[in-house]
Amino acid sequence: MKKLVLAAAALLLATTAYAAEMKFPSDAPVASVTFPDTWKPQETDTGIDVTSPDDSIYLAIDATGAKDAATAVKEAVEYFKAKGVSVDDATLQQTQQKLNGMDYATATWGGTDADGPVTISLGVLVLGPDSSLVLSYWGTQGAQDQMRGDIVGIVNSMKPAG
């Protein structure tokens, strides 16, 4: 019994601590998200860029009008190319699901960057009839497995600003 209590206590101590919820864009918030307090979020003109503590994971979340989502996705693809990320088109996997009751579509690929194998993902979360979030993800394979809980926590925390 003592071992079980110690194991449970160790698990609680290992749980990621989360910082306060961030609403964005700050001048007219349409969404909010919560990041682990060890991650490094920075507000941009249209949303938030964040990197993992070791810089192996990059995630951008941009607020856009529903009609502008395709343009935001195109800009994300250009960003990845400019950063030297190569996408293996043969690895494309697409999903459509609900996230916090909202439509969420993703496209995910394998690829490479200067450090080796990576996973690239683009997603569109429909907040409402006139607004969406575009998620751009680029992560070093291996590191993403270690940070899967953080990544899932970030994505699951996205919601309309309230």
Image (cartoon, rainbow, N blue to C red):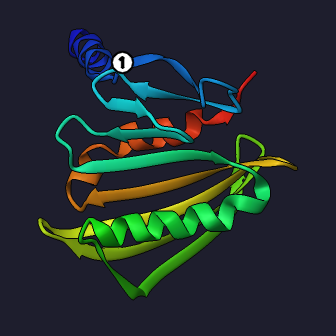
Q: Is residue 33 left or right of residue 128?
A: left
Residue 122, image x and y in percent? 51, 63
Of the 4 image quadrants, the one containing the N terminus is: top left
Q: Is residue 115 left or right of residue 38?
A: left
Q: Amino acid at mark 1?
A: Ala
Q: Nearer the viewer, residue 102 or 10?
A: 102
Q: Nearer the viewer, residue 118 or 14?
A: 118
Which residue is painted at 42% across and 17% down in the image?
19
- Above or below, 135 against 24 in this view is below
Q: Quadrant of residue 38?
A: top left
- Above or below, 75 against 146 in this view is below
Q: Is residue 106 left or right of residue 69?
A: left
Which residue is painted at 47% across and 81% down in the image?
92
Residue extending farthest right = 129
Mark 1 residue element: loop
Q: Is residue 122 left or right of residue 95?
A: left
Of the 4 image quadrants, the one containing the C terminus is: top right
**Residue underneath mark 1:** 17
Residue 47, image x and y in percent? 54, 39
Q: Nearer the viewer, residue 47 or 7?
A: 47
Residue extending farthest bottom = 90
Residue 131, image x and y in percent? 77, 47
Which residue is painted at 71% across and 33% down in the image?
30
Count of numbered labels shown in the rendering: 1
